[in-house]
Amino acid sequence: MRLIDELRSEHELIEKVAGSLRTFVSQRVRDEGDHRDGERFLSFFRHYAGTFHHAREEDILLPVLVRELELPETSGPIRSLIDQHHSMAATLASVATLVSQEHLDDQEKARLVSGSNDYVRSLWQHIDAENSVLLPEAEERLKWAGVHELPDREITEEEARARDWGPDLLSLYPPLPDPEAIRGEGCVICPSHGVSCEGLEREWWTGSEWETFEGRSG
Ligand SMILES: [Fe+2]
Ligand SMILES: [Fe+2]
């Protein structure tokens, strides 16, 4: 399904540029790097990841799951993933000034490192949860419902410009891994698991899915 394939490849770019942001921040705290690139990172994460990409999830994919599959809108994975979009946007906003600031004192450097680490780690976990749970589940369930294609939303000029900063930033600031980031597959990786969502099986599985599962495992 084209939209789902595109969301997956957008995740690949977004997660790499998140690693570049780590490299950029590690240079800025050594008073290196070009502070003006901070605006480019902000534009990429705000307009491409936070607007274009998230809007296609929130305005196209997730409403189709509610409408066609009658999955719950105000609880479980759908509510939790939308809440994560909002909390990631707030985390990014909390470090936005520091990301593009020319001169940083020691306190500001510490706030920049901690806020950008929070942002990158939550973005990676969110992408892991979508890649391993939301997208494969959506693809499979929409197939069952006979939905083979989804509408699209044109990218605006501003969003396309923001996307195009991605490859430039990747070559300027080759992504740095984060040994403290917790990554993986399945609901357990999702920060909402056990908080606002009880996991795929409890939230989405129907009686017949449980029966098939019990038949297979029993
Ligand atoms: Fe998302
Ligand atoms: Fe996503």
Image (tube, rainbow, N blue to C red):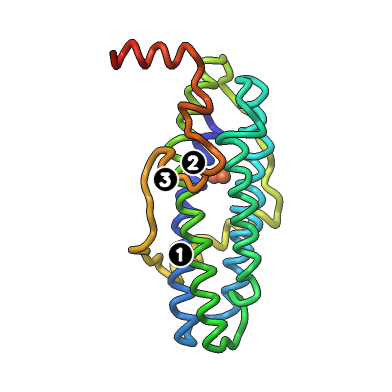
Q: Position of residue 72 (x, y in %)?
A: 63, 27
- Specify the label residue 170 is tagged with: 1
Of the residues shown, which amino acid type is indicated by label 2? Gly
Of the residues shown, which amino acid type is indicated by label 1? Leu
> Compared with residue 50, is residue 21 higher up or lower down, i.e. above or below?
below
Q: Camera-side residue: 147 or 69?
A: 69
Residue to which mark 3 is pinned? 189
Q: Earlier in the sequence, mark 3 or mark 2?
A: 3
> Compared with residue 78, is residue 206 higher up or lower down, i.e. above or below?
above
Q: Camera-side residue: 129 or 50?
A: 129
Q: CA distance from mark 3 to mark 2?
A: 11 Å
> Compared with residue 139, is residue 52 higher up or lower down, i.e. above or below?
below
Q: CA distance from mark 1 to mark 3?
A: 26 Å
Q: Secondary structure at mark 3?
A: helix
Counting labels gives: 3
Disc 2 CB within 8 Å of nearest ligand 1 atom = no
Q: Camera-side residue: 5 or 27?
A: 27
Residue to which mark 2 is pinned? 194
**Ligand 2 quadrant assignment:** top right
Residue 186, located in which quarter of the rendered image? top left
Q: Which residue: 62% across, 38% down?
A: 79
How many neighbours does mark 2 have within 10 angstroms: few (below 14), some (14-19), or many (20 or more)? few
Q: Earlier in the sequence, mark 1 or mark 3?
A: 1
Q: Position of residue 116 (x, y in %)?
A: 52, 68
Q: Which residue: 49% across, 41% down?
A: 194
Quarter of the image that includes the C terminus: top left
Q: Nearer the viewer, mark 1 or mark 2?
A: 2
Q: Position of residue 175 (x, y in %)?
A: 40, 65
